Amino acid sequence: MIIYKNILKAIANGEKLFAVLIDPDKFKLGNTKSFIKKINTSIATHIFVGGSTVDEHSTEMLVAEIKKYTNLPIVLFPGDVTQITNRADALLFLSLISGKNPEYLIGKHINAVSKLRGTHLEVIPTGYILINSEVKTAVSRVTGTSAMSRNNIQLIVDTAKAGELLGMKLMYLEAGSGAKMPLNPEIITKVKQELKIPLIVGGGIRSVIEIENAHNAGADFVVIGTAFEVNEELLNHLHQ
């Protein structure tokens, strides 16, 4: 578990982690070299690859291309088993614990086992909690589940803690791709206070200030994706 151990080590040293999420379905393969060059000079510590709906083989082609231009860890953030590729370094084995669709609690995971067998991928069990963002996200549409209300913070906290007690190694709070606003700092803080495992926060984050706000609220790991799809120049403001 090299990548996971490095995450724990970085957090123990007071480092704030940051990942750029690239959706193969929305990214032009021909832009890979120039985009990854910007990531390499930014504060990014990891590259996540994945999306809710991605054409088969698109993920593998994109990861192979990214590998040519960076030494940053490439971690799969898959919406489906078709997005698993041995070319990546690790896989967030996501369980949608905020939803009640058994396919995304365990079903897809069973289907993934045959693809994972024999790979070198570092598999990291990750609790995934989708929180309402006032728009119907792709995650809700694809999984057929409703997001949790932002107003019921205690339920969000209890859900996250239940995931940890079930053995999750990471917890991911997600406002969803295209969210109008990031998660409230209060939600992040209260969840972090309950957890002993690293906390990832993503969705609706579109500026340097919002990244800092998430980190200051208690996020160990901040993920930004849609903002780069709309404005790639944002990376220019995230220099090391």
Image: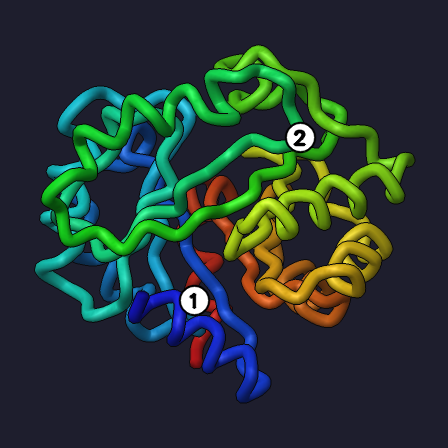
Nearer to us in this view, 47 or 87: 87
Q: Earlier in the sequence, mark 2 or mark 1?
A: 2
Q: Residues within 10 Å of mark 1 (few under 14, many from 20)?
A: few
Quarter location, residue 209 = bottom right
Residue, x 59% and y 34% (percent of image)? 176
Residue 223 image position (x, y, % from top left): 51, 54
Q: Residue at x 33, y 31 (%)?
A: 26
Kind of element beneath mark 2: loop
Separation of residues labelled 2 and 1 (CA atoms): 35 Å
Tell me the mark number nearer the camera, choosing from 2 and 1: 2
Question: What colouring does the structure picture have?
Answer: rainbow
Q: Is residue 240 left or right of residue 172?
A: left
The residue carrying mark 2 is 98
Q: Nearer the viewer, residue 83 or 176?
A: 83
User: Is the C-beta separation of discs 2 and 1 under 8 Å?
Assistant: no
| Percent coordinates x, y for residue 23 in the rendering | 35, 37
Is residue 29 something one can see in this rendering?
no
For residue 145, say whether it is visible: yes
Element marked by disc 1: helix
**Amino acid type at image mark 2:** Ser
User: Crowding near pointer 2: few (<14 within 10 Å), some, many (20+)?
Assistant: many
Q: Position of residue 86 (x, y in %)?
A: 14, 45
Query: Which of the labelled discs sits on residue 223, or is there none?
Result: none
Q: Quadrant of the C terminus?
A: bottom left
State the image coordinates of residue 188 (x, y, percent, origin top left).
Answer: 76, 56
Q: Which mark is residue 236?
A: 1
Work out which residue is located at the far front of the displayed protein and give it.
166
